Image: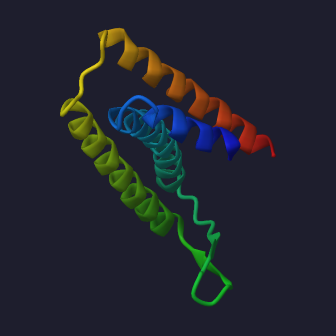
Amino acid sequence: RVSGIALGFASTFFCPRGMYLTTEAVESFVEEHYGYQIRRLTDEIARGGGKKYAANNNDTGKCDLISKKELLGMLQHCCEDEVEHKDEARERAAEGPLPWFPWVDTTWQLFVGVGSGLAANVAKRI
């Protein structure tokens, strides 16, 4: 959590464009992660897996059982939403101001992408 706040602060320190570059990098990571989950679930469905998953219903506070196809639909919808955020961030970053050197953007986005991967791996183990 602290690293996320620090990343948000650091990304906007020099200009708002940094926020858009960071958003694009994070959303790219999230899109890749959703893609993996979608492919895995699609394969399970193709093999005939009929198991249902528990999903928290925020309205009632109870868990409802949903099918893998319903879960797949939700994942696809969420992924599409993240792609929209990524594309919007890319468009806004292109508005400028442009970096002093092109490698600044590339290095920052690599740093954010690697950090996102590390954070996801830590979260899986907690």
* Identity of the residue furthest to the front in this view: 14
Rendered residue at 37%/19% (across/down): 105
Q: Could you tell whether 41 is left or right of 56 in the image?
A: left
Left or right: residue 16 versus residue 121 is left
The answer to whether residue 49 is left or right of residue 89 is right
Q: Position of residue 47 (x, y in %)?
A: 52, 51
> In the rendering, at what x and y percent does residue 10 appear?
52, 32
In the picture, measured across the screen, residue 68 lies left or right of residue 55, that is left
> Residue at the location (35% across, 55% down)?
81
- For the rendered model, the colour scheme is rainbow
The x, y position of residue 43, in whole percent, is 49, 46
* 61 vs 112: above or below: below
Give whichever of 32, 91 is nearer the camera.
Answer: 91
* Residue at (47, 48) in percent of width and height: 38
Front one among 22 and 70? 22
Residue farthest to the bottom, as pictured: 60
Along the line of sight, which residue is nearer the eye, 42 or 121? Answer: 121
Q: Quadrant of residue 59?
A: bottom right
* Residue 61 x/y as whole percent: 67, 85
Reply above or below: 31 against 113. below
Residue 109 or 99: which is nearer the viewer? 99
Q: Is residue 19 above or below residue 71?
A: above
Residue extending furthest toward the left:
95
Q: Residue at x 41, y 40 (%)?
A: 23
What number of labels is visible?
Answer: 0
